[in-house]
């Protein structure tokens, strides 16, 4: 499996984990008798982005990784979600988009140069894009989303972050 395809598979798994964290968030809010949507504006520190932004960034990280490394167009999302009912379909749409990629979609990915929209005229070679920017940046947002939920009392543990493991007998 190429690095590009393996990364998209892993980021897709993390989006599924994120969606499961939101299931636990809804359960926790119901148990504590509050609207779970209030957590979407929660942040770890006043100058950090809120949970909504973290979720949007996780979705963007996965879809742009798949799109840019395959040479395909990523779906557009306007970043207007304000409720769980609005943001969860975005997660599911990105999971569906990323799940549709096959190994063959990334043929030639290792020779691509990825332009950086935030640095006009600059870009990264695909491996550098993956290793230096996309993977660490996307995991930053997954970790921050997890930490915001955990900080607010949602009962999440390390296994929730890791998700399922493809265990084998050895």
Image (spheres, grey):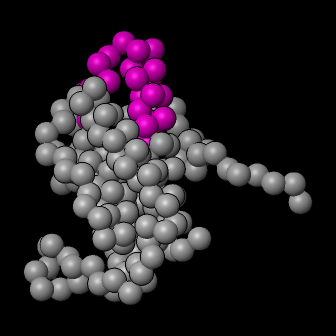
* Residue at the image position 87 percent from the left and 54 percent from the top: 169
Quadrant the N terminus occupies: bottom right
Residue 107 location, x and y as percent?
A: 45, 76
Residue found at x 38% / y 87%: 111
Residue 29 magenta-highlighted: yes
Tell me if 4 is positioned left or right of 132 in this view.
right
Taking the spot 44% from the left edge, 52% from the top edge, the residue there is 100
Residue located at (89% from left, 60% from top): 170
The answer to whether residue 2 is above or below residue 53 is: below
Residue 75: percent from left, percent from top: 24, 51
Of the pair 76 and 87, the residue shown nearer to us = 76
Q: Position of residue 73 (x, y in %)?
A: 25, 61
Q: Residue 6 placed where, x, y %?
A: 53, 66
- Based on the picture, tell me whether residue 96 belongs to the magenta stretch: no
Depth check: 76 or 105 in front?
Answer: 105
Start-end of magenta stretch: 18-40
Q: Residue furthest right?
A: 170
What count of labels does the image hold? 0
């Amino acid at each position: 499996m190429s690095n590009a395809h393996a990364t998209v598979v892993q980021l897709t798994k993390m989006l599924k984990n994120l969606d499961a964290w939101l299931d636990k968030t809804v359960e926790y809010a119901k148990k504590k008798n509050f609207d779970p949507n209030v957590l979407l504006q929660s942040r770890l520190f006043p100058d950090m982005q809120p949970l909504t932004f973290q979720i949007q960034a996780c979705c963007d990280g996965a879809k742009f990784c798949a799109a840019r490394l395959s040479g395909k167009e990523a779906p557009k999302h306007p970043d207007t979600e304000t409720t769980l009912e609005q943001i969860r379909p975005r997660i599911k749409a990105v999971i569906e988009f990323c799940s549709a990629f096959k190994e063959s979609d990334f043929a030639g990915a290792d020779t691509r140069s990825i332009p950086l929209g935030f640095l006009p005229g600059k870009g990264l070679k695909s491996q550098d894009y993956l290793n230096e920017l996309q993977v660490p940046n996307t995991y930053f947002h997954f970790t921050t989303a997890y930490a915001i939920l955990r900080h607010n009392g949602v009962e999440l543990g390390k296994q929730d972050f890791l998700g399922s493991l493809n265990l084998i007998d050895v």
